[in-house]
Amino acid sequence: MPSVPHRAEPPLGAVRRFTAALLFLGAVAHSGFLAEAFLDTALSPWHTVPARLASAGQPSSDVFRYADCVAGAAFVLAGPSLFRIAPVHWQGRLTVTVLSAYGVVLLLRAAFPPECLPDGAGRCVSQGGASDLLVLLAGVQHVVGPLIVGAWWRGRWKRFALALLVIQFALWAVVVGANWLLDGRFVGMAARMQVLGASVLFGAGVVYILRMGRRAAGVRRPAGVSSREGATSCPG
């Protein structure tokens, strides 16, 4: 009886392009708060974290919830293909796991947006609870992301990741200090810069994946070396 042919897996080049497209979409949607420049949000960008733009009852809140939903879905969907092309060491695997987990956090935040009780001057009063925990977890990722990739990227990529880590940590300190010492004033701008910094890291990931593909294609693999092994190379 003839054997049933197995469907061939897509080539790594196609997987890389698909993954890069998802990360690019996620990076753009992740910075969806920039739409506040064109929409009436009734919230101050200086004093309110961008996550609260999606709060129920706020003007144009659905726009920002959809942005979280798109970004979260893109990061989650990128997970399986990233596991195929990521380096096999544990730092590479952890990077993919953290990205996928962040996508889940964004999806949950879109489903359960943080509350916003207006306190005048475009600010919100936090009521705590699970929705605020999702905002905190998203903020933690802004520091954890560059920390993890900085542990295994090499050359100028490593220097870029570590520089971004320093910036993100400093912004995190500003957010904490503004909440404790300034009653939340100016926390909004620091938080927005953190979100933009995270989007920059996602964009760098897109470039890294595409360059990794070109490097792998330019190196002749010895006979018997599988394409999966070729996926572990890291651009300098």
Image (spheres, rainbow, N blue to C red):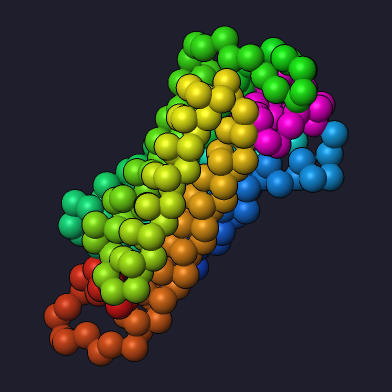
Residue closest to the eye, 58 or 70: 58
Residue lying at 42% horizontally and 37% vertically, measured from the top left: 173
Q: Position of residue 154 (x, y in %)?
A: 27, 70
Q: Is residue 48 magenta?
A: yes
Asked if 175 appears above or below 155 in the picture, the reply is above
Residue lying at 68% horizontally and 42% vertically, measured from the top left: 33
Residue lying at 50% horizontally and 11% vertically, measured from the top left: 129
Residue closest to the eye, 109 or 86: 109
Q: Position of residue 169 (x, y in %)?
A: 39, 44
Residue lying at 37% horizontally and 52% vertically, measured from the top left: 165
Residue closest to the eye, 87 or 150: 150
Asked if 13 appears above or below 49 in the picture, the reply is below
Magenta stretch bounds: 41-62
Which image quarter holds the C terminus? bottom left
Chief secondary structure of the magenta portion: loop
Residue 102 in view in this figure:
no
Q: Position of residue 137 (x, y in %)?
A: 43, 30
Asked if 92 appears above or below 221 in the picture, the reply is above
Q: Is residue 64 left or right of residue 170?
A: right
Q: How many dots with numbers?
A: 0
Q: Quadrant of residue 143?
A: top left
Q: Is residue 232 left or right of residue 78?
A: left
Residue 186 in view in this figure:
yes
Q: Position of residue 30 (x, y in %)?
A: 59, 46
Q: Is residue 66 left or right of residue 38?
A: left
